[in-house]
Amino acid sequence: MSSRDVILGRIRDALTLAPPAPQRVPREYRTGRTLPPAELIALLVDRLVDYKAHVHRCEAADLPATVVRVLGEVGARRVGVPVGLDDSWLSGFDGDVVVDGPDIPAPQLADLDAVVTSSTVSCAETGTIFLDGRADQGRRALTLVPDTHVCVVPLGTVEVGVPESLARLVPERPTTMISGPSATSDIELERVEGVHGPRNLHVVIVR
C-alpha cells in the first residue's frame, strides 16, 4: 500500500465519523442596515484614511474641478480613462487623456501617470470600494497598473456593510475590491506600497 492510499484511507475514515453536511447553509447575515448620510460618509472616510487613501469631498457640480485639482496635485500629465467615463469629468484637464481599449497592451498602461474611474458600490464599514468592469470603470489592468488611481464614489452608491454592498453587485461580473492603496509587508514587517496595484489612491466622494 502506498503512502497515498494510506492518506486517502484516513480521510475516508474521518469523513465517516463526521456529521452529515447540512442540506442548506444558513446565511443569516445582517442586511438592510442604513445610516444617515453624514454618518455614512464619516464612517467611510475614517476607514479610507486609516488605509492611507487620500479623500476629497465635493458636490456633483464641482466634480470636474475636483478631479482636475487632484490630478494637478499628483502632477499627472498623461491620464487613462475607461471608454464609458463621463467626458465632462476631465473637461478642464489640459494634459493628455488616453481612452483605454483592447488595442492597448497592459504593459503600456505603466506609461500613464494616473487613471480616473467611477465605482459601483462602496462599503463604509470596511472602507472597501468595489469595481465590476462597467464602462465607466474599465478592465482590471487599467486600475491596477498605473501608479495613481483617482476613484469617484457617488454618495448614493455607499452602503453600510459588506452584505448590503454585495447585494448590489452582479456575481457574474469581474469584481475588484479596493481597500486603500496597494500595500503589503516584507519579511521584516516593513510596509511596501505599490506591489499589486497603485501606490496612491485618491477617492472623490460626491454628495
Image: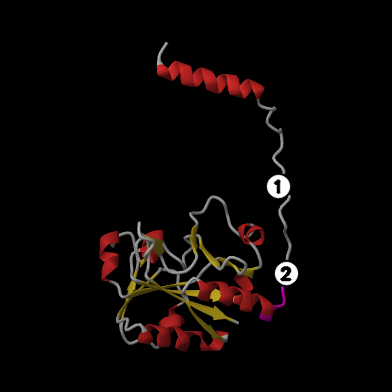
Q: Position of residue 149 (x, y in %)?
A: 40, 72
Q: Position of residue 141 (x, y in %)?
A: 36, 60
Type of the residue with mark 2: Thr
Element at label 2: loop
Q: Position of residue 8 (x, y in %)?
A: 49, 20
- Identify whether 121 is placed above or below 87: above
- Identify whether 148 is placed above or below 62: above
The residue that appears at 34% across and 62% down in the rendered structure is: 195
Neighbor class of circle 2 (other Cα within 10 Å; few <14, some 14-19, many 20+) is few
Which of the two labelled residues, at mark 1 and mark 2, occupies the earlier sequence position?
Answer: 1
Magenta stretch prevailing secondary structure: loop
User: Residue 63 — which label?
Assistant: none
- In magenta, the rendered stretch is 34-38
Residue at the disc numbered 1? 27
Image quarter where the N terminus lies is: top left
3 falls in the magenta region: no
Residue at the disc numbered 2? 34
Element at label 1: loop
- Identify whether 129 is placed above or below 58: above
Identity of the residue furthest to the front in this view: 188
The residue that appears at 60% across and 82% down in the rendered structure is: 207
Type of the residue with mark 1: Arg
Alpha carbons under labels 1 and 2: distance apart? 20 Å
Whether residue 192 appears in this view of the structure is: yes
